[in-house]
Image (cartoon, rainbow, N blue to C red):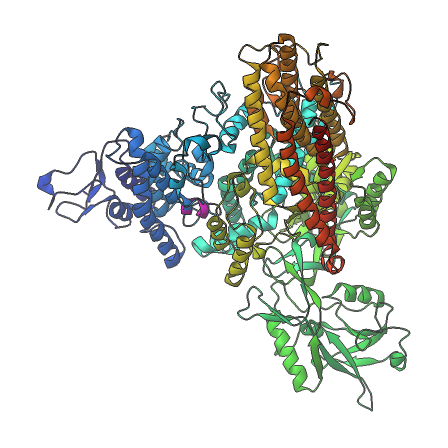
Amino acid sequence: MSILYVSPHPDAFPSLRALIAARYGEAGDGPGWGGPHPRICLQPPPSSRTPFPPPRLPALEQGPGGLWVWGAPAVAQLLWPAGLGGPGGSRAAVLVQQWVSYADTELIPAACGATLPALGLRGPGQDPQAALGALGKALNPLEDWLRLHTYLAGDAPTLADLAAVTALLLPFRYVLDPSARRIWGNVTRWFNTCVRQPEFRAVLGEVALYSGARSVTQQPGEEDGRQQRKKPKPEKKEKRDPGVITYDLPTPPGEKKDVSGAMPDSYSPQYVEAAWYPWWEQQGFFKPEYGRPSVSAPNPRGVFMMCIPPPNVTGSLHLGHALTNAIQDSLTRWHRMRGETTLWNPGCDHAGIATQVVVEKKLWKERGLNRHQLGREAFLEEVWKWKAEKGDRIYHQLKKLGSSLDWDRACFTMDPKLSATVTEAFVRLHEEGVIYRSTRLVNWSCTLNSAISDIEVDKKELTGRTLLPVPGYKEKVEFGVLVSFAYKVQGSDSDEEVVVATTRIETMLGDVAVAVHPKDPRYQHLKGKCVVHPFLSRSLPIVFDDFVDMEFGTGAVKITPAHDQNDYEVGQRHRLEAISIMDSKGALVNVPPPFLGLPRFEARKAVLAALKERGLFRGVKDNPMVVPLCNRSKDVVEPLLRPQWYVRCGEMAQAASAAVTRGDLRILPEAHQRTWHSWMDNIRDWCISRQLWWGHRIPAYFITVHDPAVPPGEDPDGRYWVSGRTEAEAREKAAREFGVSPDKISLQQDEDVLDTWFSSGLFPFSIFGWPNQSEDLSVFYPGTLLETGHDILFFWVARMVMLGLKLTGKLPFREVYLHAIVRDAHGRKMSKSLGNVIDPLDVIHGVSLQGLHDQLLNSNLDPSEVEKAKEGQKADFPAGIPECGTDALRFGLCAYTSQGRDINLDVNRILGYRHFCNKLWNATKFALRGLGKGFVPSATPKPEGHESLVDRWIRSRLTEAVRLSNEGFQAYDFPAITTAQYSFWLYELCDVYLECLKPVLNGVDQVAAECARQTLYTCLDVGLRLLSPFMPFVTEELFQRLPRRTPKAPASLCVTPYPEPSEGCAVAVASDRCSIHLQLQGLVDPARELGKLQAKRSEAQRQAQRLQERRAASSYSAKVPLEVQEADEAKLQQTEAELRKVDEAIALFQKML
């Protein structure tokens, strides 16, 4: 009998490590050392039984008189069922061993050093802050690695996870408070995932995470926490960097944050953003039912409904998501605050190809199996397991952005409710003949062994000869060349030939004709003649067709209908045979030896060599071209003839186009309407079948009739296909079709699944359970608005409109607002290889330059591209990305969103909005001191009649900001809104009014002071409500510190009414020529204010001059991309407008000198 000796102390993490390993041994094939499961003994072994005193527990005695092993690393390794744990061969074992070593040598010392002082076990001379900094430094590699991985080595817990989790048990129990866990979000997610595994839970029970007050001053990526411990000089105290200020009070998730204490000295995103979101969610503020008996209760304010563009279940947050959600959430919050019945419905897309690829790679890496070896049902079980583990990651990230979605209504496109809608839609459309079966050319990925949609095809532009890597080929393949060869004219006495050229020489084995232009004089004598194929026993007719360009090459074109779209159309016109020469994996078929069975790009070499051998090769030259690449597999896309399911789009497209023409559907910016009509006018039928296993299996069945009177059918014959909501329904329909009894019908369901875009096109009504009637469906369909990027106008928006009109008879929404694409500060498209891709979480939490570099190492970039990307990061972010916070990121993205222009995102500008948050913080802190503890706001914001001119002026400016904000939201003019709010807070409230208040509040005129306090309160109250849709966290934090006008005021800012000009907070809008300077004399220091303004003016002038010089360069218009020129023009106009404002203010204060 083997015995495991462990400590009974609940915090003895080495013993816990051994006990968990033993649990895994019991659950698996037994301990890795091959012995029996050990008996557990909760005490040290008797000294009489050990060869020498054990240095520490745990200890393992392998049978009486057997081997003794001490220490957690060795004992855990022996007890673990698979040695080092984790499949994948020696490489995985090495990775496991590296992380085990890291846990033992780095994590354990750092964890103990940080935890022991918290437990009152601080040693002499030990600095707790230094220990916390050391823990942060040790967590850095873990945090970066877990950005892209669920576990440390593979997709299941291994010894590496066991070692690291048990090493961090003490910090998570006693040190890492909620704010710290937000910093180490990936580590926390991984830790929670591990400790909830049955084997961990059996030993640890429910792990209670620390909820007390303790600040971890070092963020991910920072290199030395000790710098933040330097004590500032007393005279610089107000300007010192406080490090990371965290919310310290224990607040259970869902409980309201405690704001009764003093405000920290300065704004900290981590402090401000803590605890609010769980409370909002718990209180149901984001639900349309909030504050009303039901969603169908009449609401004179109306209904606002918008569904989220469902992100892929495989996805993680990127700047496109951040922009989409910043815009959508600001609109949703505005409508909610206006009192409308508001629903923003979340959801997630099953992402057929992407998810299947991820799980197939996982299977191959862990078990050396492909999906075919596993079988369809077992493979789908693996996909669902993966989805259960990682599928909600994107939801957690959306919550970090503050997205006010109704999570109780969250939908997954593979949920039973949505799947039923997909089946119903397919069956209805198939019965009407809108969906049909046909053999046509499709985009084919030989690696995925599936058809793919146009949006899944990347077009790589080549300027000439280029070698590209192709999956499945050891050597790179040549592209970007045009090969010319000759076909001999049949029956020619003069050895006449016709020279043709192609970029895909291997496809000549599928040639069935040569085409020339009907008016080309060079070939008129060849009418009715043929050329001879050198490798096949067939002649190729010479056909005359208008599509041929007489000026290109020799004016003669080879025709391969089965492998080129243009050739296919020529073949249809001339009734040419379409001969497929490639199978689904890209190997050659229907060709003679030695080409038969060759992979397509090996055949390319073989055909070229054979042409040269026969003297038919005529040359090769560089040729600019576009190579289609599958964006999932990186394979070269092959046009192949395959039987597929199609949707007839002609009539549906006409209806969708007419809806825009009539004005029933409004598309903004209006420039996209031309694109809409162009697409609809030239639409082709839509291929909706995919040769995958993950997705909605097509509810169509191939019919076999066991009756000699009925001939057997073939796949492309639509009569032998039947659809049904169930197999029984399909059988009945087939029996009726062929006039036989159901028992003579055999059905075989199609193996394929539907294109992901088909289910996404049904999303606006599938989320409400269509075709079944429900309260939600009647209230929220049709929706109000669809907001998304303009790049999926056709792939998603158009299909939602077409399917919505066809199946429900209603438009799915009344308006479409399309935002721009996010580019980097230089106007370049974001690309991993350029190193300019920005993770929004890095902007929110901050990241060091080394942290950015480490992300590249964990990406799929080629090593050659990593160094180039590092240089790009070093140039753009030499000091990394500073912590900006969620509010600053949201506000900045919306401020950038000018209709019709792409967004050139400069992180420094986002940092500027973080400083703006700090200005809000300090202004409110000053104002609260000025109001005093006993201040009671008046019941309404209306002026009392004794306000001074400066009071009336700031009220007028506030009213103007309210007007501009509401008008901006109605017009989707986000820069106008953010500019109005920024200007009010910064230039009018802070720079002018607060300066005027200081002598008034300290003066002897109590009436004036009370009026000023009421006006100040109104400015804070209304100003925070204005900002709330863009900056929900900081505005909630500050709003909760204000007194309320009435006891029945709403609990949260997010459900407080949005300001309207009719609230009456001003008597009139002060004109630009208001003589306010007469009243300001003696209240402000004009010289000081002039100094500030002149500094602002100098900076604005420098910015304007740089832009003017840049635009005046001789090569500017020719070399700078148009979108960058437009952005520069917008920046210049904004800078010049700011200059005019500053000049007006300078003139105002100069009159006071």
Instruction: Pick the quarter of the image with the C terminus.
Output: top right
Residue at 20% in and 44% down: 60
Q: Tell me if residue 293 comes above or below residue 360 in the rendering.
A: above
Kindly give the residue lying farthest to the front in the view shown.
1153
Q: Position of residue 872 (x, y in %)?
A: 56, 55
Residue at 53% in and 12% down: 933
Residue 972 located left or right of residue 989 = right
- Main secondary structure found in the magenta portion: helix
Image quadrant where residue 58 sits? top left
Q: Position of residue 347 (x, y in %)?
A: 62, 36
**Numbered label tally:** 0
Instruction: Pick the quarter of the image with the N terminus.
Output: top left
Q: Is residue 1106 magenta?
A: no
Residue 168 shows in this picture = yes
Kindly give the residue lying farthest to the left in the view shown.
48
Residue 312 shows in this picture = no
Residue 255 located left or right of residue 306 = left
Residue 758 located left or right of residue 187 = right
Q: Nearer the viewer, residue 1027 or 543?
A: 1027
Q: Position of residue 191 (x, y in %)?
A: 41, 38
Q: Nearer the viewer, residue 288 or 948?
A: 948
Q: Position of residue 609 (x, y in %)?
A: 63, 81
Image quadrant where residue 41 sits? top left
Residue 583 located left or right of residue 195 = right
Task: Specify the segment rendered in magenta.
Answer: 141-147
Residue at 37% in and 44% down: 138
